[in-house]
Amino acid sequence: MNFDLSEDQVALRDAIRSLCRGRFTGERVRKGFDQAMFDELATTGVFSLRADGFGWADAAITFEELGRAVVPGPLVWTHLAHGVAEGIVTGLERPRDGAPALLEHLAVADGIAVVDDDGISLVPSDAVAGVTALDWPLDPLTPVHRIDALPTGERIGGRDEAAAWRRGGGLLTAAFEVGMAQACTEAATGYSLARRQFDRPIGSFQAVKHILADMVVRAEVARTAVHAAAVTMDDPGIGDRERALSGARLLAAEAAEKNAKGSLQVHGGIGFTWEADVHLYLKRAWMLSTAFGNVHVHADALAARLVR
Amino acid sequence: MDLRYSETDEAFRAELRTWLAGALSELPTPPARDDWPARVRYDTEWQRRLFDAGYAGISWPAEYGGRGASPSEQLVFLEETTRARAPYVGVNFVGTLHCGPTLIAEGTDAQKSAHLPRILRGEEVWCQCFSEPDAGSDLAGLRTRAVRDGDDYVVTGQKIWCSFGHVGDFGELLVRTDPDAAKHRGITWLILPMDLPGIDVRPIETVLGSSEFCEVFLDDVRVPAANRVGDENDGWRVTNVTLSFERGTAFVSEMVDALRLAEELAPDVHDLSDRRELAHVVAQLDALWALTKRNVSQAAHDGAPGPGAFMFKLAYSEARDRLGELCMRVLDRGAFDIHDERVEERLRTLSLPIAAGTSQIQRNIIGERLLGLPKEQPWPRSA
């Protein structure tokens, strides 16, 4: 037992972090996801990571870093689809009873993965009809289309694969959320040191300091939960995979949302502006909280594991 | 990152499980909460059994009579003793988890040989004499005075919230030896034999209706200078050694027990919002158990616990409060009877965000030490 990052994992984390610092700057991220971004991430191995011999723990460490930089795009779906579908893949849970669907990143996607309880289907992105782009999507970096009728598509996986994708998607989303939560703590801490009122940095006031302390603890506890879930997915013999995953997802979704709000509060008026990055984190946190099972789904799943 | 126990760990687990099954079947009935003589006997007899079986001082180095167990064996020990519902550390808390580690780190050879074996065998009960009526969160503002007189310190003052004060054989005592120095620089750490003349111990009745805490009045108590741990006026540093043990490890075993409580509550939780709240609490406790594993791994690797050790108590206090509130809601009118373990625990854990550094103090420490935020400017001294 050594529940610390291995030397290789530290190297992986640092490599992805420096890639994000160098290539996915705030300015570029604000332009949204495109083919060039996909190519760069693909070259780095973000999507092929597990096919290349890395585990879920390594994938989680990678997505944590992408989350810190709030990199846009259907990154989790494309990672899950690696080896099964070519190119950029977006995806969603099939809406019940043929209800209209809201889908992210349709315009850049080559395919759409549709997950339901019985399996996974792949729909070519040009095969969907009745498509309307939202002209004012919640997150400016995540374009959304409304789809009136989602075709059946071609089955690319059965029941087990669907369950595995939901688990993997939940884990990587949680990792991304943890990265966002950490970035919010760091941005707000930096601001609280730079911003002076009453002749001193606002971070010296306990009223502000305690918000930041809660943020760093929330992110670290969630991060540990995500790492534990990832390790359990790599080695299911060590514990209850579903319980670990749902717990991680609950804490990570909460951390991303609450830390973005904490950051907004510490930034004050600036945090309410379009110019500051704070809203990008908060809006993404809200969007991601609906992916691969929302908090209610995971709370119910975890509670069910306790009374087996 | 690796969470798998080694074969050695699993062998240790099997051996421990066998021993626990036998030892626990021979245990007497646990005493009533307010029957202190019986509680001391029960807790110290259990400590003696642990010692005889080689499990006392699980994390203490072997040269001081401990088991010197590896970090993962310590985790196994926690898991198994909790699962088997072995007696909690009880009146041995201060000795085994607090002052023992401090003596190992800072004590003289004579102090170590006088106390460490007796603590491990359950022959000495320790209490803590840190806080004062006017020195709580501002512990370094303590005023209990110690004046050197020949081979003794003459101590006068008042201590409060002394855990196990009325049953302790020895106290870990903080005194002011230099009233003119800056407040952190004039403090000394003394071993206080509780039977010295001039000591008056008065129990404080808590919200549980029992007396875990005491007031200790000291009136010209002559404490031998040989009982000083660390240098004169270096007590604040020695204290922080102790406090870091408290933050890092002292609450882990009751956290594991909280997980048991939450799991046992689950079948009784039928309301949807309560079930979701239970899931949140369990997620937090599971994460804190993982955080403990990370802290232990980092401490073994780097020689010092990582940032998680600063966070544990704050996060645990919050999770435990949510669990307590949930228990009260689920029990409904069943909560009218404190004999229910869950009600008793709800009351007991009200002290968690206050004891051993309030949650507000924990947030200051996290903000200042981990995030590098400046201290709030001091209040101007009145002339």
Image: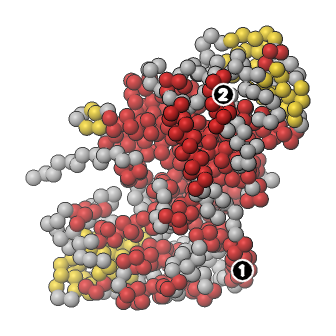
Q: Which residue is mark 2?
A: A38
Q: Position of residue B18 (x, y in %)?
A: 74, 80
Left or right: A148 with respect to B168?
right
Q: Which residue is mark 1?
A: B15
Q: Chain of mark 1?
A: B
Q: Secondary structure at mark 1?
A: helix
Residue B73's place in the image compared with A110, above or below, is: below
Question: What residue is at 79 percent from the left and 18 percent from the top?
Answer: A125
Q: Which residue, as the protein is rendered here, is positioned at the far front?
A: A43
Check disc 2 and give the amino acid type: Phe
Question: What residue is at 60 percent from the left and 13 percent from the top?
Answer: A136
Q: Secondary structure at mark 2?
A: helix
Q: Chain of mark 2?
A: A
Q: Which residue, as the protein is rendered here, is positioned at the far left?
A: B383
Left or right: A160 with respect to B377?
right
Question: What residue is at 89 percent from the left and 37 percent from the top?
Answer: A158
Q: CA distance from mark 2 to mark 1?
A: 54 Å
Q: Quadrant of residue A20?
A: top right
Check disc 1 and give the amino acid type: Glu
Is residue B132 visible in the rendered image? The answer is: yes
Residue B347's place in the image compared with A301, above or below, is: below
Left or right: B364 with respect to B309?
left
For the residue carrying disc 1, how many other residues have a C-alpha within 10 Å: few (<14), some (14-19), or many (20+)? few
Q: Nearer the viewer, residue B364 or B276?
A: B364
Tag 2 and tag 1 share a subunit: no
Q: Quadrant of residue B56?
A: bottom right
Is residue B209 visible in the rendered image? The answer is: no
Residue A179's place in the image compared with B278, above or below, is: above
Q: Position of residue B310 (x, y in %)?
A: 45, 56
Q: Position of residue B72 (x, y in %)?
A: 62, 69
